[in-house]
Image: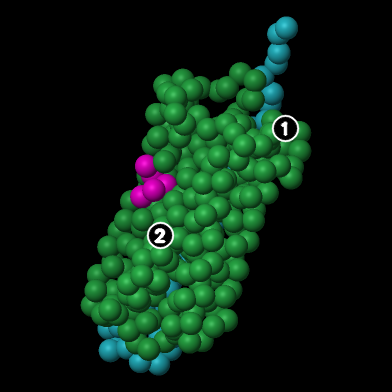
Chain colours: A green, B cyan
């Protein structure tokens, strides 16, 4: 099935509304983090980078997981909309990854004394980022829609395979990166104010992810309907 | 042993500004492309849509 233009325009308008809400919610998280959460005694103010860094990582991993799942479904059902949705999620995931990969080193410099270390978590995350940059480059380079969708679906599924390794890497390898405080078998290990702010951040940036993806998907559908190929990547 | 809370608010400011710039620039790019897609659609589609 292929998308139609009126549906694409509705998706764009809905996405723009959701994106605006997401940006406002993200601004609210900034305010919560700065004025509501306490200052961590050993790390100082820099610990508050956590409230931007962790939701960005969450958004990136959700986005790349969605790419993988949509790619599997595309190879199964051959519905072009799934390919366009996967591509949209990949682009948004790259944007979230850029936030994760810039805020992380800034935080790391203050608590580890170094901007970067080649440990498992950081290296795998960087590799995932490059994989999806390559995914987008591949889509821009292949003119045939069918081939482009098939090739990129395979790359997207490879990215999905990496996601659980990245989450579990702090358990599997010796690493400087702290273990999860939220997504773990036991209860969250942080004070309630910090936990509330973190959960608000997760919610706000999930909303922002949904808004970004809806707008991007609508743009891709509109370009696809009008017969363009390069913008439908 | 007592310890002093480090004064590193500049790192916090840098991280928050970098994150905000990335999100806002990306949102701005999407808005621009979305407006173009809506405008082209309103004209019945056609040239330039694939750019």
C-alpha span from label 1 to label 2:
35 Å
Instruction: Tell me the subunit letter for badge 2.
Output: A
Name which of mark 1 and mark 2 comes first in the sequence: 2
- From what the image shows, is residue A86 above or below residue A56? below
- Describe residue A197's horizontal placement relative to residue A108 as left or right: left
Question: What residue lies at 41% left-to-right and 41% top-to-bottom?
Answer: A202
Over which residues does the magenta segment extend? A203-207
Instruction: Tell me the subunit letter for badge 1.
Output: A
Determine which residue is flagged by label 1.
Answer: A112
- From what the image shows, is residue A40 above or below residue A155? above
Question: What residue lies at 49% left-to-right and 50% top-to-bottom?
Answer: A61
Question: What residue lies at 58% left-to-right and 73% top-to-bottom?
Answer: A137
Q: Are marks 1 and 2 on the same chain?
A: yes
**To which quarter of the image does residue A86 belong?**
bottom left
| Residue A24 is covered by the magenta coloring | no
Q: Is residue A198 visible?
A: yes
Determine which residue is flagged by label 2.
Answer: A69
Comparing A206 with B22, the one in front is: A206
Report crowding for label 1: few under 14, some 14 to 19, many 20 or more residues within 10 A (C-alpha): few
């Amino acid at each position: 099935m292929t998308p139609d233009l009126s549906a694409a325009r509705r998706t764009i308008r809905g996405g723009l509304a959701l994106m605006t809400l997401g940006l406002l919610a993200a601004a609210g998280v900034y305010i919560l983090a700065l004025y509501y959460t306490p200052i961590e005694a050993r790390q100082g103010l820099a610990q508050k980078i956590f409230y931007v860094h962790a939701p960005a990582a969450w958004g990136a991993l959700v986005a790349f997981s969605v790419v993988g799942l949509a790619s599997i479904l595309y190879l199964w059902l051959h519905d072009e909309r799934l390919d366009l949705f996967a591509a949209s999620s990949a682009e948004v995931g790259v944007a979230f990854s850029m936030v994760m990969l810039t805020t992380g080193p800034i935080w790391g410099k203050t608590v580890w004394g170094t901007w970067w270390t080649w440990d498992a978590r950081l290296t795998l995350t960087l590799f995932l980022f490059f994989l999806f940059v390559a995914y987008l480059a591949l889509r821009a380079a292949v003119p045939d829609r069918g081939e482009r969708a098939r090739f990129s679906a395979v790359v997207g599924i490879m990215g999905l395979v990496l996601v659980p390794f990245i989450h579990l890497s702090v358990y599997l390898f010796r690493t400087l990166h702290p273990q999860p405080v939220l997504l773990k078998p036991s209860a969250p290990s942080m004070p309630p104010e910090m936990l509330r702010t973190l959960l608000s951040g997760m919610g706000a940036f999930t909303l922002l992810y949904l808004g970004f993806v809806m707008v991007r998907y609508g743009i891709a559908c509109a370009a696809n309907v009008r017969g363009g190929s390069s913008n439908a990547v | 042993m007592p310890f002093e809370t480090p004064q590193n608010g500049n790192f916090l400011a840098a991280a928050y500004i970098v994150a905000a710039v990335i999100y806002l620039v990306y949102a701005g790019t999407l808005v621009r492309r979305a407006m173009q897609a809506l405008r082209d659609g309103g004209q019945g589609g056609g040239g330039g849509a694939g750019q």
